[in-house]
Amino acid sequence: MAEIRLAKLAHSYGNGTNALKPLDMTWRDGGTYALLGPSGCGKSTMLNIISGLLKPSEGRVLFDGQDVTDKDTGARNIAQVFQVPVIYRSMTVGENLAFPLVCRRVPTPRIKARVEAIAERLGLSRHLNSRAVALTADQKQLISLGRGLVREDVSAVLLDEPLTVIDPQMKFELRKILKDINREFRLTMVLVTHDQNEALTFADTVVVMNHGEVIQAGTPQELFERPATTHVGTFIGSPAMNFLPAVREGDRVLVPGAGLSRTAPADLPTTDLTLAFRPEHAVAGGPLAGTVTRIWFEGADQVLALSVGDASLRIRAVAGAETVGAIVRFDVPQDCLRLYHQGRLVA
Amino acid sequence: MKTLYLALKYLAIALWSAFVVFPFLWALTTSFKSANGVTGGATWIPWVQYEPSLQGWQSLFGGVGGINVVKPFYNSLVVTLSASVISITLGTLAAYALSRFTFRFLWMRNSDITFFFISQRIMPPIVLAIPFFLMLRSLGLLDSLPGLILVYVALLMPIAVWVMVDFFNGVPRGLDEMAWMDGCNPITTFWRVILPNALPGLVVAGMFCIIFGWNDFFFAFTLTFTETQLLPVAIVSLNSSVTPWWSLSAAALVSIAPLVVLAFVVERFLSKGGLAGAVR
Ligand SMILES: Nc1ncnc2c1ncn2[C@@H]1O[C@H](COP(=O)(O)OP(=O)(O)OP(=O)(O)O)[C@@H](O)[C@H]1O
Ligand SMILES: [Mg+2]
């Protein structure tokens, strides 16, 4: 349980490329975080620096204001779970779970109680005396996870895509277990994932990374409503946000031929502008019109792909009688229109 | 089809077993023969085909014109086991270090250092005979068990390092990292996490060390005179102008006995699944 601060942190693996560009960031004590981003954007690098497996080439790592940059992994008291389950093959499931406590010389009765509690939580009670190698891949991952959770005083639990090997049914269950444990023990948890659904349902703060940079950190709501870059807008939400090339005309920004426009802030550059809105924010009826080119269903809604002037965009609507080729009228509320310059949010 | 396959399989196994067993059988029968029995062609059944004699075995245990094999056997056992244990201990530690930490010595990196160890076994042993002799003499350890143990450690440790480096490289690094995270220091990581995972490697390395150590004749011969005799040297001294096949056969059986026992022990370990799953 600790607040983790990354101060002017940067890392390069020594091959010239910056795996992490300089960044400042604070992970709140007891918060749940999801780290989201494409492959190779530096997510694992960041976690490994926090846990101490990797020494950052620049900057400091602070736990509750204490500089731990030069401390070993063991001294930081971090639990990390990796994509591939790591188990001690020579031990039983129970011994695996007990190992972190045994190493830290916790009294035996206490170990027994903790191991049993955690095993119960993860549904491993029946297997406590089995050899760990004999279990299935997702059970092995539960063991890795369990070894992180047996320590009550752990500073943070870092989960590096731990659910990839777990089957979908179990995934849901596990996320719930993680949430429960977070609430109960008020552990700081960071979950790395490729899956935006997982990120948005698990975390109270979602951190989006790309090319070694943190692009945006915010609540799922903020990420959805005000993506900091066009990249985040594309990455988060399904279907993706609509991005339409726009031009400035006087005090307005508009999408040529589409009828979509909003007021331009003062000192707005005239080139490289994009207007954007969420398919969910379109409302039926209104001044705008488009031809339906494609229809598909997402949950109770349907998504209409429209061509409006030269642009093509998607709107989400309650399932109705629309057919391909029909003209659909819609509107986008002014407060839902976002304006981007060079891919970054302006207004 | 299936029966044919089974029949062929058993035939192959039977042939192979015969190939393996017959030399033993030959040695066993010969060890109970006298000069007459040996020259009378290959015979197998005592009393019927040849008159059994204990002459061969007697000459191993202080009989007329023979030797006493007990002391050399004991010496060989002590030297081989001590040298193997020391080599495995040191070799395993060295191998773990070479597998996990980065070293630099002049231009040499980890792989060069590992190769340096192995290269000790690439040289023909004769090259080492004189240096070893001189070194042991200056230490006053010529013709003594400690001296032989020292030399054998030098010979066996490369094997241990070589086998164990390979095994440790096969144990994922993630395991070390996990152990650190769980609160191990480098020593407990090695002892409680990595070593149990490399147990099959220890068995293999131990087997190699014991076999090489037990079989060595060259250094046992060149570095001793009369005080300390190892089994291979003692056996050779049985030989005379008229080859005593009976004594030599008995000696051969005595000298391979420990290795046969070792083979059975290791075989049990292997078939019990000690190696299964450990070597991916
Ligand atoms: N040991 C290493 N040596 C050199 N470069 C590395 C090393 N590990 C990672 N990198 C590089 O650093 C960058 C960030 O890697 P990192 O593993 O942090 O990405 P990631 O976001 O975790 O990706 P993934 O989603 O695939 O796990 C990548 O470009 C990668 O190629
Ligand atoms: Mg990764």
Image (cartoon, coloured by chain):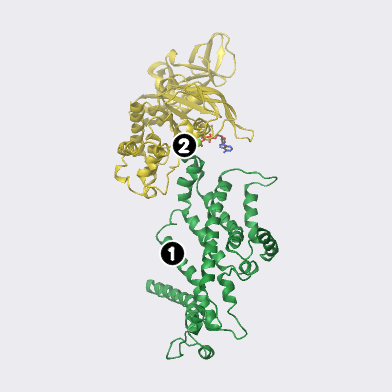
Residue A325 image point, x, y percent: 42, 28
Q: Same chain, marks 1 and 2?
A: yes
Q: Which residue matches tag 2?
A: B181
Residue B219 percent coordinates (x, y): 63, 66
Mark 1 nearby-residue class (10 Å; few <14, some 14–19, many ≥20): few
Residue B265 numbered mark, or none: 1
Disc 1 secondary structure class: helix
Name the spot of residue B189 as percent of width and height, x first: 48, 43
Which chain does green denote in the image? B
Q: Nearer the viewer, residue B166 or A39?
A: B166
Q: In the displayed structure, would residue A92 be above or below residue A50?
A: below
Of circles 1 and 2, the one toward us is 1
Looking at the rendered structure, the secondary structure element under dot 2 is helix
What colour denotes chain A? yellow
Q: CA distance from mark 1 to mark 2?
A: 37 Å
Residue B39 vs B207, above or below: the answer is: below
The residue positioned 41% from the left and 49% from the top of the image is A90
Q: Is mark 1 within 8 Å of ligand 1?
A: no
Q: Is residue A166 visible?
A: no
Q: Residues within 10 Å of mark 2 (few under 14, many from 20)?
A: many
Asked if residue A214 is positioned above or below residue B87 in the image, the reply reads above
Which quadrant of the render holds ligand 1? Answer: top right
Disc 1: host chain: B
Q: Is mark 2 within 8 Å of ligand 2?
A: no
The amino acid at mark 1 is: Val
| Sequence order check, earlier mark of 1 and 2 | 2
Q: Nearer the viewer, residue B248 or B184?
A: B248
Residue A2 appears in the rendering: yes
